[in-house]
Image (cartoon, grey):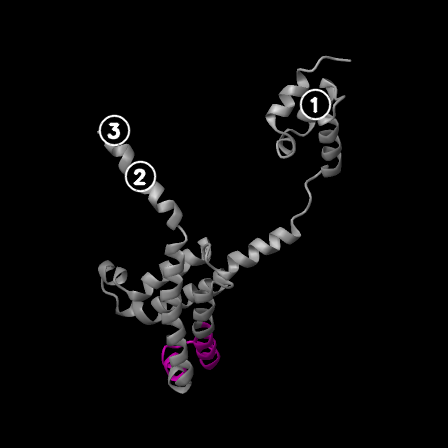
Amino acid sequence: MNLLIKYVWFGTEKVAQPLLWMPPLIARLVVGYVFMMAGWGKLQHLPQVQENFVAWGFPFAHFLANLTAGWEFVGGIMIMMGLMTRISAGGLAVIMLVAIAVVQLPEVESFADLIALEELTLFVVFTWLAVAGAGKVSLDQWLMANYLREKRPSPPFSDEIDFLANSATASNAQPACVLGLVLCHPNDLAQRLSLSALIRRTHQPLH
């Protein structure tokens, strides 16, 4: 039984790991397309949308109607591209929350009615994207990787560590030099010296 559980548990984990890029991509493409089309429809009928906002009692109804339509259209495109996903999804999550509170909630009679709201499901998806990000297959990921690769600062004491590392691997290196490097910069040392090199140097006799 334990062996079966092990294979089922870790087997599914092993299969799922290479596919972690897929759920955010699918979610982005679906909800992004839906809101791109919804926003485009609102932009084509702005007067009616503005009248609805006035009837719902929103302050600055015309401005908010235009903002909502534009954000849904542009935000949907951005989410599909995976560009500025957290900002776009965060704005759409707020729009869904307001729609629930102002438009849908007065008609909700039970908890089951609330859970069944399409806006609540979309709010959950947009909140997830706003927190988790666009995933690996996205422009956000590409831009972040390139930005970090170009702007990544050198680690503290980088020059000093390079000098000590070169000294420690020299033919006449003393065990004291290696010991000082280990004690002062153990983390950065691992990036420059192999463990085997350290072992060889520390076992050399003093001259």
Rendered position, 94 above or below 191: below
Q: Amino acid at mark 3?
A: Asn
**Closer to viewer: mark 2 or mark 3:** 2
Name the residue at the front extreme. Answer: 171
Q: Identify the amino acid type marked 2.
A: Gly
Mark 2 burial class by Cα count in 10 Å: few <14, some 14-19, many 20+? few
Residue at x 43% of width, y 72% of height: 72
In the image, is 88 to the left or to the right of 51? right
Residue identifier under label 2 = 11
Measure how far apart labels 2 and 3 are at the Cα level: 13 Å
Q: Position of residue 127 (x, y in %)?
A: 41, 58
**Farthest-out residue, bottom:** 47
**From what the image shows, is residue 62 above or below residue 123?**
below
Mark 1 → mark 2, Cα distance in angstroms:
43 Å
The residue where tag 3 is placed is 2
Lower position in the chain sequence, tag 1 or tag 2? 2
Q: Amino acid at mark 1?
A: Val
Quarter of the image with the N terminus in it: top left
Q: Position of residue 134 (x, y in %)?
A: 46, 58
Quadrant hosting residue 194: top right
Return the residue nearer the eye: 57 or 113.
113
Would you say the residues marked 1 and 3 are in contact, meaning their CB atoms lie under 8 Å apart?
A: no
Q: Which residues are magenta?
A: 50-71
Q: Main secondary structure of the magenta part?
A: helix
Q: What's the mark number on residue 178?
A: 1
Mark 3 element type: helix
Could you tell me which quadrant the C terminus lies in?
A: top right
Q: Residue at the spot x=69%, y=21% of the render?
A: 179
Locate residue 167, reporting x and y percent: 75, 27
Whole-Å distance between the Cαs marked 1 and 3? 47 Å
